[in-house]
Image (spheres, rainbow, N blue to C red):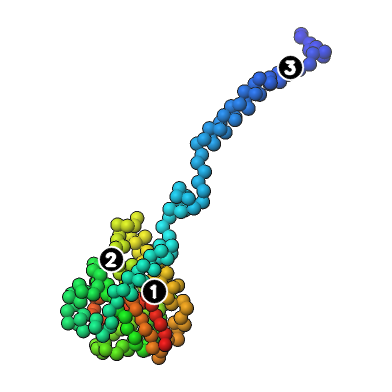
Amino acid sequence: MAHSNPGMSAHKAPAPSRRGMLIGVAVALALAAGIALDTTVVPIGSENDVRAQAFSPDSYGQEQFPRIQAFVKEKAVDAATLAPAVLADKAAAAKQYGTASSTGAIMFVTLTGVAGEARSGVYPLTVPGVPAEITVRVQTGPAINGTDLRDAPGDIAFGDFKNQIEYQDAGSGINRAMKAAVLDGIDTASLTGKTLTVTGAFRLINPKNWMITPVEVAVQ
């Protein structure tokens, strides 16, 4: 029967050699260097930043509204001139005074009238020289609806955007920029009975119904 020798200690695994440790460190450093070489640092806001590439309707609106405002003001026709023209021949008036659009030409008008009772931020206007059969209204918010300002210059096209949502959002961004620049300094909740001078755009669908999106408003 075999007996253990109490003088013999249990076998221990040899400690890792210094050379082996150095090789392990070198491999780790090489891997780290490879990862670093394969990693691109993208500064926030740079052209490679995905967030910077995302479409911003408000930035777009702030960029576009000043030129749209100038365009509408330059093209605006006095309401007393425009009214009989659209009543006599809608198509001819659109061709002479408007910007073509698939859902009705965008017309440009300037007028002075007295504001009636508002409904959801939309004021009817009584305008001298405009026949009573034409209803003239101006929207003042809080929400500004429609894409009349987006479509006004005629050079903002669906193909400029990634999809229909961006195209629609572009119009909303322009409307918000207009509101901030034109309407936020006005007490739009209490315009009834006041005389307003308005320059703006409307879509010519029904010649007897003008819903104006303003680019300039003065309250007397």
Residue 178 lies left or right of residue 75; in this view the side is right
Q: Position of residue 107 (x, y in %)?
A: 27, 75
Q: Position of residue 214 (x, y in %)?
A: 36, 77
Residue carrying label 2: 154
Image quadrant in which you'd find residue 17: top right
Q: Earlier in the sequence, mark 1 or mark 2?
A: 1
Residue carrying label 1: 144
Q: Position of residue 65 (x, y in %)?
A: 38, 68
Location of the N terminus by quadrant is top right
Where is 66 relative to 16, above or below?
Answer: below
Disc 3 secondary structure class: loop
> Which residue type does callout 2 highlight?
Gly
Return the residue found at the far front. Answer: 74
Residue located at (33% from left, 75% from top): 73
Cα–Cα gap, marks 3 and 1: 86 Å
Q: Earlier in the sequence, mark 3 or mark 1?
A: 3
Image quadrant in which you'd find residue 125: bottom left
The one nearer the camera, 111 or 44, is 111
Residue located at (73% from left, 17% from top): 11
Q: Earlier in the sequence, mark 2 or mark 3?
A: 3
Residue depth check, mark 2 versus mark 3: number of the one nearer the observer: 2
Disc 2 secondary structure class: loop
> Which residue type does callout 1 highlight?
Ile
